[in-house]
Image (cartoon, coloured by chain):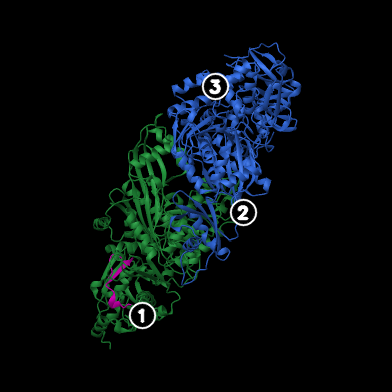
Chain colours: A blue, B green
Amino acid sequence: MGKCLCHPEVETSYLCMKDNVYLCAECLTCRHPNIYCKFRSSCPIWYMQTKGAEWGDEKIAGAERPVRTVVFMPDNKEVKVPEGTTLLEAAQAADVRLNASCNGKGACGKCKLIVESGDVDTNSTHLLSEKEKEKNYVLACQSIVRGDVTVRIPEETLERRLKVAGMGKETTEQLRGLVKEINPMLREVPLELSAPTLDDPVSDLDRLNRGLKKAGCNVDSLSVGLEVMRDLAAAMRDDNWRVTASIMGKKCSNEILRVASGNGLPRSLGLAIDVGTTSIVVYLVDMTNGNILAATSGHNKQAACGDDVINRIICAEKNGVKKLSRMGLAAINGLINEALDSIGADPNEIKNVVISGNTTMVHLLLQVEPRYIRREPYIPVVSEFPVFKGSDIGLKVNPIAAVFVMPGPASYVGGDIVSGVLYSGFHREEPLTLFIDVGTNGEIVLGNKDWLMAASCSAGPAFEGGGIRWGMRAEEGAIEKISINSDTLEPSFSTVGNVLPRGICGSGMIDLIPEMLLAGIIDQRGRFIQDGGHPRLKQDGDDIAYVLALAEDTAMDEEIIFSEADIENIIRSKGAVYAGFTVLLKQTGLEFSMVDRLWIAGGFGQYLDIEKAIIIGMLPDIDRKKFQYLGNSSIAGAYMALLSNKFREEARKISKKMTYIDFSSNSQFMDEFSAALFLPHTNIKEFPNIKRLLNVKCRLT
Amino acid sequence: MGKCLCHPEVETSYLCMKDNVYLCAECLTCRHPNIYCKFRSSCPIWYMQTKGAEWGDEKIAGAERPVRTVVFMPDNKEVKVPEGTTLLEAAQAADVRLNASCNGKGACGKCKLIVESGDVDTNSTHLLSEKEKEKNYVLACQSIVRGDVTVRIPEETLERRLKVAGMGKETTEQLRGLVKEINPMLREVPLELSAPTLDDPVSDLDRLNRGLKKAGCNVDSLSVGLEVMRDLAAAMRDDNWRVTASIMGKKCSNEILRVASGNGLPRSLGLAIDVGTTSIVVYLVDMTNGNILAATSGHNKQAACGDDVINRIICAEKNGVKKLSRMGLAAINGLINEALDSIGADPNEIKNVVISGNTTMVHLLLQVEPRYIRREPYIPVVSEFPVFKGSDIGLKVNPIAAVFVMPGPASYVGGDIVSGVLYSGFHREEPLTLFIDVGTNGEIVLGNKDWLMAASCSAGPAFEGGGIRWGMRAEEGAIEKISINSDTLEPSFSTVGNVLPRGICGSGMIDLIPEMLLAGIIDQRGRFIQDGGHPRLKQDGDDIAYVLALAEDTAMDEEIIFSEADIENIIRSKGAVYAGFTVLLKQTGLEFSMVDRLWIAGGFGQYLDIEKAIIIGMLPDIDRKKFQYLGNSSIAGAYMALLSNKFREEARKISKKMTYIDFSSNSQFMDEFSAALFLPHTNIKEFPNIKRLLNVKCRLT
């Protein structure tokens, strides 16, 4: 028991685990979604909430319960929580990040912990093996703290730092070369003005405008707000008529956002931000020369509310869009801080920002209602955005920083795709190009300089590790390349970072399935041909699975397997991509043979084996020279728009030019999708080279 | 003693006189200028502050003093104040409005009260006559409450309602006729949109824009803020795709400020506001047809900080510009409420506002630094303003109401003059016109459709009653017309409202002085020719005075006199006006004879006797047909700009076109001013008709 921080007259047993302070029942109401603590500015819980962390919600409030200590090993992180809190909530309060794709529903089985000591009530679950249960494994979300507890976080449960794909000097130079001229949205214009006299008595603002005109600004379309006017007299005189004006370029008029005394030009930094459903990438850019000074990436903390956009929207409907916005912002702001720290810079130096994300991510971030995105006829609230100020949307940058949000033409083809097209540049050229970005969704754009058609094909999160038992993102420990000896069925593989394997990422899966097919382990339907007799094949409940890595060879001392259910998931994903290609072409009266280029962007990892992707039937069996893997094209386009007004205008034009075709209620798409649920395809004639290969290797007719 | 409202644990003897609640020392700090109570929203003192009222300030805080009751008769208004409060502060706390031009400095002698009972410490003052002192008159600002007190407010001390000059059906129709087409700044566009389908899946905002385009809006230059986006999905669907969009017209781009569900068009009202240094006039206008639905006027509550702009600026430097802004706003919002009440309307129905005021008034209202207006080289911060929102500046109107502030080219030629020129229309015509607005200052504009020159001539507040012993504004009881029988020296006069006289207003003074001159009471220097022997002439201290009304004939039972000092004040004012005319003409190489028209605007009252104004030498002795009296041209121009975009643009052009000449350090002006300190002028040749008249009447050579 202790005195409440806000109401010292109240004795309470609630202890805030963050700052080790007591809080009374009234203060605790702030933890309910959408109800904010009235002592906000001094409230550590409010602070937690804005950081995206939270604990207990309804479960705690209302009754006083004893406080228990939970210790997370191996880092020995300790928190105090009321009895009845789940271990997952306790982890969130302790800022310990666990894998928890389903956000505590007990469905994904990823939030495994090992109870080392203490009293925990845990629900039984089929997601843990008997072996695991013997070792005291529990699911964090299904386990309730009853006393002081010490738990250990196994390797596979820890969230890991994403690698920033394709960074480095080479990429920087390649990107920098695309931008001929730098035009920031927020410009800082240093001026040395003449002092007023009786013969030159124009108002301070007119004097400023005169100076700006001399400096080449279009003064006719300048607007200025009351706050600037209120501070103007002092700013003009404080350094003897030397000032710096910050001017935001808008669609039609420009606005003077600040006038500061002194005309020594401070450093100006910019941010390109790719807000993905799964991961977020941030580039910190020198706005004077376009150099990428730092790059960071991390998980979108909204992932705790589900892996895909549909689950995020459902979560927003239930808990309020503000909550998801805060989670996304917490992740973005964390990455911004990290990038700033790495070069010793200050948030106020960031004066230009471009955000690229899919339509749902952008709606959530801006706190714009997302619910109609998931309901037929799938309508977003906004497609094209005005230039915002950093403070409008809660970014930890200069409050007057200009923020350009990539326009996105439809609910399922968003700004990230526009950004990708911008980077790829095929919208400026003659050749007919098929562009696909495989992320948590799969978006396809077909066209050239004259027209653009776009569609989304719900590939699902399998290639990013979602829905796959040992699936994971392209992080350290992910199996990314595999070959299988067709005699011994023994695999050989390499992992990201060359460490012991922890799971398998998208490029690994696209390697694994053709290898299993060609080794005769599975048939073209993706079913296991052989039974569990072989050491590499084992019964897994009702299912059969291929043992990719033996327990002794993994980071977790547990075997990594790939089951029939996993294969089916991949086949559905690749089938959706291929059906997407097919229907988009058919709707425009074209065929694969007419396509001059097929460019692939997305989060497969460092590379994508095109040949293997053709064998599984994700990519069409056409001239290999037509293929190119672009990597993260969303961040690349954001970088270009950050630096150049020409590219911002181009992004708007791309978005306007795209014709969106909805596949979700399209029967042709369903037919093509069903036909593609085969390796490589039910119509093998579409894959003549693969047919030959399979004939040789597997003696298929 | 009682429990503090905010801190019930504290016993205190401070009683808030407004709401009869106790407040502890900590809460009381909020009464210090620029320190705000942290319990603001529930604090009655904060409430008082925002209303412009206040009490005690530094004098109270710091020491606990007993609470005393002060009763103001004849209305029996009662307040409780700590001992040591002045009667003026007590009156302000009780919301009793007293005349107090000098804001408690003990200089103007206008805040007279009669102590009926109780203990009051009062400083001796020469501003009260012995007779007054005998009757227990005190100056409210010089008297400190020592016990429970009852005071009576004499007639002459009560602030009176101004009459709105020139209102009525005729004016309405005349003004209405000047506006050919109505274009509000904030337009409400009702729309009936089609519901989205799979074949028409554009975003909500694009759907809205499409509807607006159909309705004739320029969609290309439309911008929209985050708040509108956040509420858009619900607004679009709540009444089945029937919506009303509120669009603010800006200089270059337009902005969607609100989208509400439903498309039944609500009433739209507008306000034209003339913010004078002394008085404020408000017209409430039907924006659909331009009809003036109500008109109110009242005193600018800033008058408690001094009569002229210089004293207001000094006060703002001392107490913060926010304080003066609040005082001005309190007066304006009170008048708005009054106008709304009279027609049963709601503040939210007001969606367009035009404010016309001099440069200082506008700076103070907008809380823009005014201090450099009064310092050489006399620089305002802003001359031309963007369109504000009602909520930006604290007007009690719809928060998104568009507010146009009349641009003003210089520190001493402001938006009220631009507004006056706009109304008069001479800037569109060929004839050379001399325009003067005689308010607390006197601003002169010379020119025609090709050019405009402007200057300010510091006429001072005499014509509005300032600095004149019995001077008052053109309110009820003001002597406005006078003639004097040159044999008996008996005056006959009429008053505003035909009631017993309480003082003399501008038009009365312009009558009185020629009458005294022609009756041989004063000479051309304004000195009394006869001594105090005559019943109408009396010694007044060292001075001689003309008794305009005997004690038994006045509302206050006290005689109304006009002394040599008063005459000197008027001569100085009229001399400044005439010198202004002369110098402005000389600077442009012109003469009075070349002027085709001389138009006079201002606050003289209902009318101005041109002939008398020529006799005293305020107006030049030219063809009488060239003169015209315009009344309050500032409010009339504001009305025109409220309704029509053409006139708003015209106002901007007028302001830009005006060349300002500063007289304050102009030696030519000083020479001309000295020459004009005579009746009518030291150079009588400039007044041939008046010379003849005086020859006949007074046998002058």
Q: CA distance from mark 2 to mark 3?
A: 58 Å
Is A94 colored magenta in this rendering? no
Q: What subunit carries mark 2?
A: A
Q: Is residue B216 above or below residue A115?
A: below
Residue B219's x, y, as percent? 38, 44
Neighbor class of circle 1 (other Cα within 10 Å; few <14, some 14-19, many 20+) is many
- Vertical side of B219 occupied by A85: above or below: above
> Which residue is denoted by mark 2 in the rendering?
A267
Residue A168 locus on image (x, y percent): 66, 42
Label 2: state its secondary structure: loop
Q: What's the residue type where badge 1 is placed? A: Ala
> Circle 1 is placed at which residue position?
B676
Q: Which mark is residue A87?
A: none
The residue located at (36%, 39%) in the rendering is B211
Q: Please report, as a chain letter, where disc 3 is located.
A: A
Looking at numbered disc 2 in the image, what kind of residue is underneath it? Arg
Magenta residues, as a range? B590-608
Would residue B244 be found to the left or right of residue A556 on screen? left
Q: Nearer the viewer, residue A124 or A435?
A: A435
Q: Nearer the viewer, residue A310 or B101?
A: A310
Asked if the residues shown at circle 3 and circle 1 are in contact, with their CB atoms under 8 angstroms apart, the answer is: no
Residue where numbered disc 3 is placed: A688
Q: Earlier in the sequence, mark 2 or mark 3?
A: 2
Residue A18 lies in quadrant: top right
Q: Is residue A447 above or below residue B361?
A: above
- Looking at the image, is mark 2 or mark 1 nearer the viewer? 2
Q: Residue lying furthest bottom in this view?
A: B701
